[in-house]
Amino acid sequence: MEYTVRSGDTLWRIAKRFFGTPEKWNVIAQDNNIARAQRLMVGDKLILRDVLLINREGDTGNMEAIPTSSDVPEHAPSLIPGRAFLFVIADEVNPLQAKVVRKVMVNPQMAARTAARLGRPVELMPDPSIFGIHPTGPESPVSMGRHVMNLKPSPFSSASTHPFGAPRFSGSSFWIDVDGARAAGATFHDTAAILSDLDRIAKKMRKPADVAKIEGFKELVRGDREILVRGSVPAGAIKGSGTMALTRGLQVVQVVGFVVTAVELAQATEKSIATRSAKPMAAEGIRQVGGWAMAWGGVKLGGAAGVALGVETGPGAILAGAAGALVGGFAGYLGFDWVADQVDPN
């Protein structure tokens, strides 16, 4: 018998409908040379063995749709083709991880425009995502308040809790990973601490004009939502706008991967309930654990490969890690799929 694939069809549903049991999906796959990872397409023609038919509905493929609510829930092989590109691990799992933003003039064109607007030269700075952030005077006794009053050299570097940096300043935005910077020995001092130190300095002032000047600095600190970083921050804890955008894009892919994994585990659970066997759920668990574990390992291998090629930070490092996750995750899934098939064939 010839059957035309319709929307919503899977090998499991077709086998259930025509052969009386979804377990015979592999017979349809074998007779029609369908690989395990191949997706059924609407309009495809399938040959169904007449000797196995219990429900012959004709060969036009246009019969009235049969309700599927009573079908045995299946672990559909059709989800697997999308699996390859979903094994991506973004280098930041938590997009809400604490960050502060520092604006630095690293773009020559932007510096030229800013200089023309201000009427004075604007100094270009080293790219923090390559060279890190370093204070002008690591051992300087200058306090937080004195730093924001422009007393240099200072052990501090200014940043902001505004999402894209203090709007008052021109420059490229760089995001500092607070946990990564702290791990390297840097300390963070919030807006309230800066204001408190300015108050301390104001109490020592004798002239009203000097006190008023400090009040002006306090308004700027509040408006900038300024935060001070004491000590050096390594390049690995800093991302530019391109790297951040790439990371966020990979995180979207990663979330889709998590959703697909949840769907596949749910389908395996339903199959276990329908067949009264824990094997389908156990087998799918093996596949998913293998895929994601190898994806995490692939991040490290990809990163190591990037370092070997001279790519240690920036978008190149993120792509190297993502490529490693992709290859490692897909290889892990396929490898553990063989192990899982020994438990419950898919």
Image: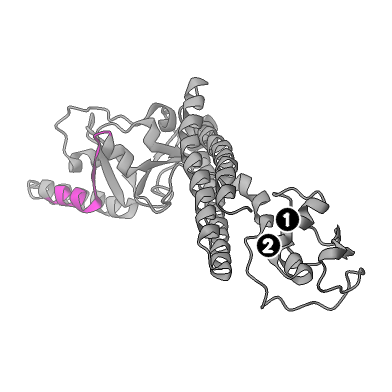
Residue 8, numbered label: none
Percent position of residue 341, x then y? 59, 49
Above or below for 48 versus 135: below
Question: Which kind of residue does numbered mark 2 sit on?
Answer: Glu
Residue 26, numbered label: 1
Marks 1 and 2 sit apart, C-alpha to C-alpha, by 7 Å
Numbered range of the magenta stretch = 184-199
User: What's the coloring here?
Assistant: one colour
Residue 157 seen anywhere in this rendered image of the structure: no
What residue is pinned by disc 2? 23
Question: Which kind of residue does numbered mark 1 sit on?
Answer: Asn
Image quadrant containing the N terminus: bottom right
- The answer to whether 180 appears left or right of 69 in the picture is left
Above or below for 21 versus 83: below
- Write down the quadrant of residue 42 in the picture: bottom right
Pick the residue in front: 139 or 202. Answer: 139
Residue 136 seen anywhere in this rendered image of the structure: yes
Percent position of residue 20, x then y? 74, 71
Query: Does the magenta run of residues contain 185?
Result: yes
- The answer to whether 47 appears left or right of 333 in the picture is right
Label 2 sits on a secondary structure element that is helix
CA neighbours of label 2 inside 10 A, class few (<14), some (14 to 19), many (20+)? some
Pick the residue in front: 103 or 310. Answer: 310
- Write down the quadrant of residue 5 in the picture: bottom right
At x 87%, y 76%, the residue is 63
CA neighbours of label 1 inside 10 A, class few (<14), some (14 to 19), many (20+)? some
Percent position of residue 285, x then y? 50, 53
Pick the residue in front: 226 or 202. Answer: 226
